[in-house]
Image (cartoon, rainbow, N blue to C red):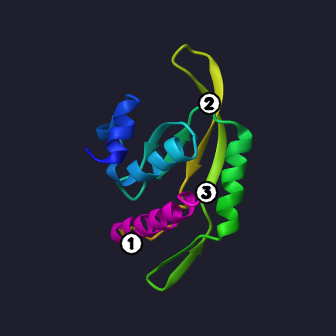
Amino acid sequence: MNNINKAFDERNIPYNDIDPEMRELIYVLNFQLNLKTDYCCYGHDEYQETIVVFNSSVKDSDILNLAERLASEKIVTEINGFRFYGFGEFNKCVIEDEDHNLVTNWNYQFPNPIFEGDLRTKCKFKEIFMENLLDIVKEI
């Protein structure tokens, strides 16, 4: 059992339910930055977006600090001779919890450039972007 798997297991977080591509990011957000997440999806076809949904306990100020840090790093993702700038977007949402109460939470979405049906290029973009993103969040 690796350290990431062990950390999730100790907190009863179903490691195998997390998309493999998202595990390291979710680990860093939850256990190094103390930004509790509720859900994530890597998006496995050209129409699905990559998203992280934070727990409603995460403070606005913590999300804004993370967004400011990502913005200051000027993430550049290069693929097929093109450069994409930006860190994605954070959105505050109102959702209904399991007790049917309205709560607010934040979600984070990767940038979603259009590659005209070229799924391989989009997958490669996400892979490169994730590497760049992880390099930054690990240093926060």
Label 1: how many Cα within 10 Å (few below 14, some 14–19, many 20+): some
**Residue corresponding to mark 2:** 56
Q: What's under tag 3, amino acid-wise?
A: Ile
First along the sequence among labels 3 and 1: 1
Q: Quadrant of the C terminus?
A: bottom right
**Residue corresponding to mark 1:** 121
Q: What's under tag 2, amino acid-wise?
A: Ser
Image point 33% across, 39% down: which residue? 6
The rendered magenta stretch, by its main secondary structure, is classed as helix
Q: Position of residue 125 (x, y in %)?
A: 44, 69
**Magenta stretch: residue 134 in it?**
yes
In the depicted structure, whether residue 12 falls above or below residue 88: above
Q: How far is mark 3 from mark 2, CA to CA?
A: 21 Å
Image point 52% across, 62% down: which residue? 133
Of residues 38 and 135, the one nearer the viewer is: 135
Label 2: how many Cα within 10 Å (few below 14, some 14–19, many 20+): some
Q: Quadrant of the N terminus?
A: top left
Q: Position of residue 107 (x, y in %)?
A: 59, 43
State the residue lying farthest toward the top: 99
Image point 37% across, 28% down: which residue? 12
Label 3: how many Cα within 10 Å (few below 14, some 14–19, many 20+): few
Q: What's under tag 1, amino acid-wise?
A: Thr
Mark 3 in CB contact with mark 2 (< 8 angstroms) = no
Give the magenta range.
119-140
In the depicted structure, whether residue 124 falls above or below residue 43: below
